[in-house]
Image: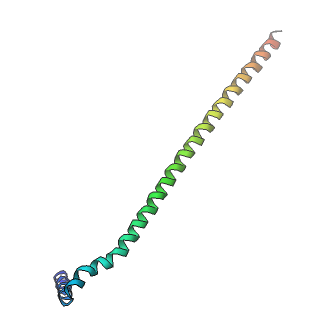
């Protein structure tokens, strides 16, 4: 019932306005809101692009660090094997 009353009030307001004003007034009221929403959408889009770029950069850094770690681990394993081989030679006599 309240919704029907509000609709009738809006209809009555539109009927009281001159014909040209009734059609352009909603556009004038919504234009700034549409512009703000468009600007907000653009800011969100740019933020998403920046975050994706940062994500790819961090993934590349992670992969590079992983490769460096694996290379260091291989080098240490080889060094340990050399030490063990040298120790076994000394122990053997």
Q: Is residue 36 above or below residue 8?
A: above
Indicate the quadrant where residue 41 lies. Answer: bottom left
Compared across the picture, whether 48 is left or right of 33 comes to right
At 65% from the left and 34% from the top, the residue drawn is 69
Compared across the picture, whether 11 is left or right of 58 comes to left
Q: Is residue 10 above or below residue 53?
A: below
At 58% from the left and 38% from the top, the residue drawn is 63
Q: Is residue 6 above or below residue 69?
A: below
Q: Where is residue 48 shown, x and y percent of the image?
A: 46, 55
Question: How many discs mark residues in the rendered view?
Answer: 0
Compared across the picture, whether 44 is left or right of 68 comes to left
Q: Is residue 90 above or below residue 43?
A: above
At 48% from the left and 53% from the top, the residue drawn is 49
Q: Where is residue 84 shown, x and y percent of the image?
A: 75, 19
- Relative to the observer, which residue lies in front, 69 or 16? 16
- Relative to the observer, which residue lies in front, 37 or 63? 37
């Amino acid at each position: 019932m309240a919704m029907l009353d509000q609709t009738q009030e809006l209809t009555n307001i539109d009927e009281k306005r001159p014909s040209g004003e009734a059609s352009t007034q909603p556009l004038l009221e919504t234009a700034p809101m549409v512009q703000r929403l468009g600007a907000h959408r653009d800011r969100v889009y740019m933020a998403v692009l920046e975050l994706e770029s940062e994500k790819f950069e961090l993934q590349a850094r992670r992969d590079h660090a992983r490769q460096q770690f694996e290379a260091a681990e291989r080098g240490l394993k080889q060094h340990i094997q050399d030490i063990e081989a040298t120790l076994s030679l000394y122990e053997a006599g």
